Image (tube, helix red, strand yellow):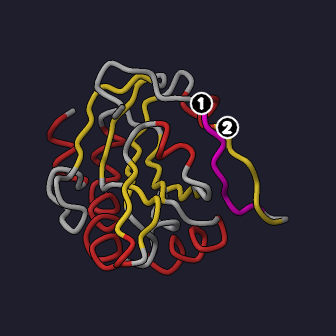
Amino acid sequence: MTISEGANLPGATLLQMGANGPEAVDLGAKLQGRKVVIFGLPGAYTGTCTTAHVPSFMRTKDKFAAKGVDEIICVSVNDPFVMKAWGESTGATAAGITFLGDADGAFTKAIGLDFSVPAAGLIDRSKRYALYAEGGVVKVLQVEENAGQCTVSGGEALLDAI
C-alpha cells in the first residue's frame, strides 16, 4: 500500500558516506521534531533525475528554508558510494541537499513507491515523488504518474503545495 498524507513514515535505516565509509542513518530519528522534505527518484545519474529533479530542489532550497524546512533529503535505491559521488557531481551536496542511499530498497518498498522495468534494467527502483513531513507525518505527497517526468514532484511544485 502506498503511503498517504496524514500517515507516519516508517522507520528505516538509510546509508550515507561518512569520513570513514558508509554510515547508517536512522530516518525516524532524523525526522523527529523536524520539518523535512524527502524526494525520491529512480536512480542516480539518470537523465531526468540529474537534469530536472535534483536541480529543482537546489533552486528552491532557500525558499523551503524560509518556510521552516530543516532539511531536504534525496533518496534513491543506490549505494552510498554512488549517492555521494552523484551529490558532489551535481553540486547538490555543496548546495546543502542530503543524499541517502536506500541500497536494498526497503524504505521505498515500505512506503509503496517501488516499481520495476526489467527491460530498462530498473529493478525495485523508486517512483519519482516528493513529500513534506512534520515530525515524520506526511503532510504533502506528490507522486509522478510517469517516472520520466518531473512536474508535480519538482521543488517548485512541492514548495507551492506547502
At x 16% / y 48%, what residue is drawn? 157
Q: Which residue is mark 2?
A: 26
**Quadrant for the C terminus in the image:** top left
Taking 47 as reference, is 160 left or right? left
The furthest residue to the right: 20
- Compared to residue 124, the image places residue 110 above or below, namely above
Main SS, magenta residues: strand
> Where does residue 125 sit, x and y in percent of width and height?
43, 60
Taking 114 as reference, is 33 left or right? right
> Where does residue 155 sit, x and y in percent of width and height?
25, 53
- Compared to residue 23, the image places residue 89 above or below, namely below
Residue nearest the observer in this picture, 4 or 140 = 4
Q: Considering the numbered disc 2 on the image, is that residue within a helix, a strand or a loop? A: strand
- Residue 27 found in image quarter: top right
At x 51% / y 75%, what residue is drawn? 86
Q: Which residue is mark 1?
A: 11
Taking 150 as reference, is 136 left or right? right
At x 34% / y 34%, what residue is drawn? 2
Residue nearest the observer in this picture, 106 or 161 = 106
Residue density around tag 1, few if under 14, some if 14–19, many if 20 or more, within 10 Å: some
Alpha-carbon distance for marks 1 and 2? 7 Å
Amino acid type of the residue that numbered disc 2 sits on in the rendered structure: Asp
> Where does residue 40 sit, x and y in percent of width and height?
39, 53
Residue nearest the observer in this picture, 64 or 118 = 118
The answer to whether mark 1 and mark 2 are in CB contact below 8 A is yes
Q: Is residue 89 magenta?
A: no
At x 42% / y 77%, what residue is drawn? 121
Taking 107 as reference, is 146 left or right? left
Amino acid type of the residue that numbered disc 1 sits on in the rendered structure: Gly
> Where does residue 85 sit, x and y in percent of width and height?
58, 77
Range of the magenta residues? 11-18
